[in-house]
Amino acid sequence: METMENHHATIASVAITAYSALSACGIGNKTLYKSLIDNESQLAPLSLFNIPFPAYVGEIKQPLLAIREQLAEYNCRNARVALTALNDVDGGVREAIEIAKEKYGAHRIGVIIGTSTSGLYETESAYGVLLEEGNMPADFHFVTEHAYQATARFVQLELGLTGVCYAISTACSSGAKAIAAGQRLINGGLCDAVIVGGVDTLCRLTLRGFRSLELVSSEPCTPMDRNRKGISIGEAAGLLVLEKRHADNAHTMKVLAVGESSDAHHMSTPHPEGRGAALAMKNALQLAGLKAEDIDYLNLHATATKINDSVESRAVFSVFADSVPCSGTKGITGHTLGAAGALETIITLTALQQQFIPGTQGLQELDDDCQCQVIKAPLQTKNMQIAMSNSFGFGGNNASVIVAL
Amino acid sequence: MMKQLFIKSAAVCCPEVALLAALDLRSSDIDKSLIPAGMRRRTSMTTRMAITAAKHACTQANSDTQNLASVFASLGGEIQVTDALCRLLPDENELLSPTQFHNSVHNTTAGYWGILNKCQAPTTAIAAADDTFAMGLIEVWAQLQQEPGERLLVCYDELWPQYLAPPIGQSAFACAFVLSTETDQSIGAITMPQVSQLKQQDLKVDWVKLTESAPAAAVIPLLLALQDKQSGLVPLNIKAPIWTSQFEPYFCESSFWASKPKFAAKA
């Protein structure tokens, strides 16, 4: 089914010609769908490294593909996670890019990857050597592993692309903002296709940093629950191929718009009334030329911290009242930080494609604070056409993605 | 399709006077008075430099900072904060400072800029290694194509610990531009950044050397073109493929640049 062209939209939609996710749910869209429809938590105690406190995480357990020799200086967990998602045959991201290269040329295809910590996991180990021996290890390559653009550049080289390439790093909204940037690059005529998304991997700094803010739950997170105790961190890659719309891709799903805003309030605490969050959702609706009632499903940011969830509830209620079914999926995948916006956009696409509303794993009893229509267990539905996914990050950086069948 | 972007202002903040004198660039040192004391205590050198440059550019352009969307472009961002945290991590018993942790994100400067100016317009933080300035211009270009008006582009990097990626980080440098889709009050115009046939050996050696140690110095050819009111092809990065824009100077009599026509090295 194809959405009718919306003449109220102020920007053109772009086609999503392939997408793939790698997360604690496993590789590919089918494993993701299975976890979602079963509403099965993939959170487990951390095994990748030691931390001095208990925490459940959404850790990728599946073997990761190796980086080829010629790109050895890019070799880090973040790049391996990206490569594994890229090569997922079922998702077909690599194949879509190969076709796009034929069609548009390698220089017309951009790469925009969101990340919050890039290859920091390896850098942390390198610091262990630095402090012991006074020097960084010989195989430490800061710019090609740790620096924010490293994974984007790796993807560009791996695919043989030569066009626009950069990272967006706006903490937990990075993946959603990469989608916004990709749509703009296509609509602005700077690219014909863009591989966008988010890639973030577990590391000590984020675990211990969120712990220092007293935001890490010692049990699996319970978004929107009245007894929620904080976040469970996860890791993921979510990659999407965006292309300008034409006859060949008329029947793919689409990105209609991404609304963005700033809180202008505090570095790590959202504005108490959720004004930035509400503004991002309103901007997305306005750009897409839609009304609140046109949204059939809303994937919440719902990190499961006390304040984030109550502020988001308020913001959602101010835009939608209680009319839109919503759910938060971080009880399944964990909060995948810079990848969350991309992973949860893919979750939202899965919901549209499979015509179901994901549940909110971990939610027992809805917080009195929350007047929104939060769905606990997955719900089969029909006629869902358009859905939204929220992502809000440190620095008060907000993005809401609207996608359509 | 948009053919040109108009430059309304440009400002540099670089604490190294000798470096600026050598380049004959007009700049200012970090202006602490621009950030309230409570916030200043929590900000790094990189944020203070970037905010100084941004504030000066907005003042020159007479921009409404409460409604101005922005793009912050930096290779390493808050590298000193991240470095200090990484030094604590090998010891499992070390507690991290929550403020330092949230100040380690790449969009820290963007976040403080928004808070400082009570600005709810979108802001983004990008990184592209040696291509950071070129990609920052491309991000601004795409944004303005979608929504005409003004954008703030800030390009910056601070001093880095010498063991991370020498020679990167030997000099600190921040620069800000207000870019517009309107020619009104502009001091120059640039075309869409494109990959050129230029090779590194075609570029000025001094500039390449400086940019290797201070990535944000990639802005210097554009600054010099503005200063000299010299039209021509301006390189935006130093490693092939070299991105370029065609620059055209404008003679705006009422602008900051007309009254102080040349950058002068700070005494």
Image (cartoon, helix red, strand yellow):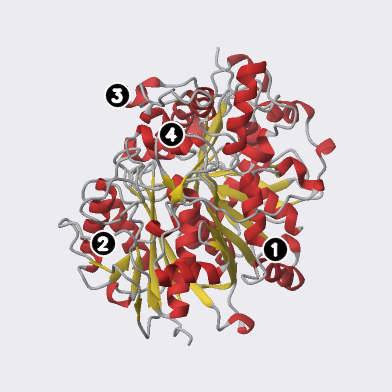
What's the amino acid at mark 2? Val
Whichever of labels 4 and 2 marks the residue nearer the N terminus, that label is 4
Q: Amino acid at mark 3?
A: Gly
Q: Which mark is residue B38?
A: 3
What is the quadrant of residue A259 in the picture?
bottom left
| Kind of residue at disc 4 | Arg
Characterize the local packing of mark 4: few (<14), some (14-19) or many (20 or more) Cα atoms within 10 angstroms. Answer: many
* CA–CA distance in space, label 3 to label 2: 32 Å
- Disc 2, SS: helix
Task: Give the residue type that dot 1 points to.
Answer: Arg
- As drawn, A359 above or below A6: above
Can you give x and y, in whole percent of width and height, for residue A388 in the image? 38, 67
Dot label at residue A208: 4
Q: Is residue B7 above or below residue A297?
A: above
Residue occupying the point 47% across, 78% down: A353
Residue at x 32%, y 70% (from the top left corner): A377
Query: Which residue of the protein is positioned furthest toward the top in this rendering?
Result: B267
Asked whether, in this view, residue A116 is left or right of residue A160, the answer is left
Inter-mark Cα distance, 4 to 2? 30 Å
Q: On what subunit does the disc labeled 2 rest?
A: A
Residues at marks 1 and 3 on the same chain: no
- Whichever of labels 1 and 2 marks the residue nearer the N terminus, that label is 1
Q: Is residue A11 visible?
A: no
Label 2 neighbourhood size at 10 Å, few (<14), some (14-19), many (20+)?
many
Chain letter, disc 3 residue: B
User: Along the horizontal axis of the image, is B131 left or right of A397?
Assistant: right
Discs 1, 2: same chain: yes
Q: Secondary structure beneath disc 1?
A: helix
Question: How far is the residue under mark 1 from the one under mark 4?
Answer: 41 Å
Chain letter of disc 4?
A
